[in-house]
Image: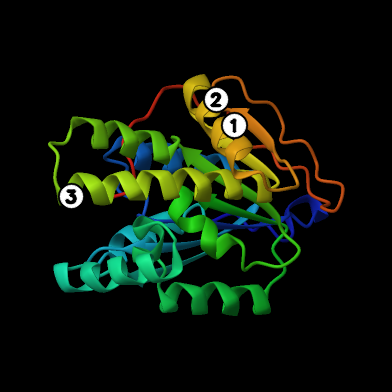
Amino acid sequence: MRDRKCLTGVSFPRVLMLTQVLPYPPDSGPKIKTYNVIKYLSRRYRVTLASFVRGDQPEHARALKRYCEAVYTVPMERGAMRDVRYLGLSFLVGQPFLMIRDDRRAMRALVDRLSAEHHFDVVHADQLNMAQYAKRVPNAFKVLDAHNALWVLYKRLWKTMAPGPRKWLLGRDWRLLKTYEGQVVREFDAVLAVSYEDKAALQEAAAAARAAPSTALQTEGRAGRVPPHPRKRPTYSPPRLRGGLRGGPP
């Protein structure tokens, strides 16, 4: 890996990349997208990756060290009994089940430790599930790479379901997701979307959330630089990726 600290005497900004799935091997649409974002950023930034993993993936994590200064992984275990507990907690706190399900103590501890050890100029949350961890990084330019408007995907799925308890639960969750996603869009310094359709849906959610301040929102088909936040120093330049990826977090 090229030394990002000393190349041409310039200290490259640090980026903390947070991913819900380890983006290697790049064998699906979202993973291909995130893998190429990391490759692109590695040319201009010192990238630290913190990712959930399913099972044992040490070789895949090592492969990403070609582009990352460091790679950290946290196991993601799921099951029916866990989901029942997370669903109950979702009702208790009034937050989307999908976000409660992926709120893990180990990832919170890792992000807090990395933030204490390093100053990150940018924190890049890949997909909505990782936004809750990006919020924990102090004094960083916060970017949400939304891929899609998640609330719209689950609303579409809800419309296809037959009446019953599962449809009722999903109907509750997509409405909570819309509010949650809108709040994140407004709280973050910049948001990336893969299509103008998703951009419009995210803006709709942000308007409905009625939270301030507003944020810059880009579509990756024709995205330029993320406008610098007045309180943040780095100018963050994500890649211009084309295509309309579909599908929410696994």
Corner quadrant of residue 138:
bottom right
Residue 114 position, x and y percent, is 59, 74
Q: Answer left or right for 198 relative to 77.
A: right
Residue drawn at (36%, 71%), measured in percent from left and top?
89
Residue 149 position, x and y percent, is 45, 36
Task: Kindly indicate whether the residue at mark 1 contacts the one at mark 3 (C-beta within 8 angstroms).
Answer: no
Q: Secondary structure at mark 2?
A: helix
Question: If you read the primary sequence from the N terminus, does the residue marked by circle 3 or circle 1 appear first?
Answer: 3
Residue behind mark 2: 200
* Above-or-below relation of 78 to 160: below
Corner quadrant of residue 244:
top left
Per the model, the C-alpha gap separating discs 3 and 1 is 28 Å
Residue behind mark 1: 203
Q: Answer left or right for 242 relative to 24.
A: right
* Above-or-below relation of 197 to 1: above
Q: Is residue 215 visible?
A: yes
